[in-house]
Image (cartoon, grey):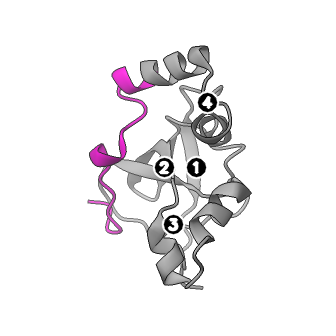
Amino acid sequence: MPGGFGENLSTTEWTETNVCVGDVVRFGRVLLQVNQGRQPCWKLNCRFAQPDMALRLQSSRRSGWYYRVLEAGMAEPGDFLRVVDRPRPEWSIERLYLLFYCETHDGNELASMAAMLTRGILHHPAQISMSSTFG
């Protein structure tokens, strides 16, 4: 089924509660890294002709995440996504979501998130490069 939300990959059993920032994922010959949670924007409102669609997706806490390509390669039908490293098991995408939208004044959490930015684990949206061809 084609994606409706701009996704390049869709998965089952992978959710914001069990995917972590920094996860390194093998997909065929491609090596990816989860580098931030997805933040829905106004484009969804236009795409679905619903003025509150981005907010509805954000409120569902199921908005997804972005990968960056660590090693370019090919993936084929039947290849599975497999976590090969989890350097930040305490930083689920859900935790990041809660910090961005619910616990926005938690200084300790913000400092911890900022430390990931400085170590290159979490990336600002302007630094993300994602390609459907993984290369």
- Please give the label number shown on residue 9: 3
Q: Nearer the viewer, residue 106 or 9?
A: 106
Identify residue for label 1: 82
Q: Which residue is mark 2?
A: 26
Which residue is painted at 53% across and 26% down in the image? 87
Q: Which residue is mark 4?
A: 91
Examine the structure image and report whether residue 124 is included in the region drawn in magenta.
yes
Of pointers 3 and 1, the one earlier in the residue sequence? 3
**Residue 82 screen position, x and y as percent:** 58, 49
> Residue at the front extreme?
51
Q: What amino acid type is highlighted by mark number 3?
A: Leu
Q: CA distance from mark 4 to mark 1?
A: 18 Å
98 left or right, relative to 83: right
Q: Residue 47: x percent and y percent? A: 49, 82
Magenta residue span: 116-135
Q: Are marks 1 and 2 in contact (CB under 8 Å)?
A: yes
Number of the front mark, 2 or 4: 4
Mark sitting earlier along the chain (4/1): 1
Task: Report how far apart the C-alphas of labels 4 and 3 lie in the structure.
Answer: 21 Å
Q: Amino acid at mark 2?
A: Arg
Q: Specify the quadrant that holds the N terminus.
A: bottom right
Q: Would you say 49 lies left or right of 95 here?
A: left
Mark 4 and mark 3 lie on one chain; the one further toward the N terminus is: 3
Task: Check whether the beta carbons of the residues at disc 4 and disc 1 lie within 8 A of each other.
Answer: no
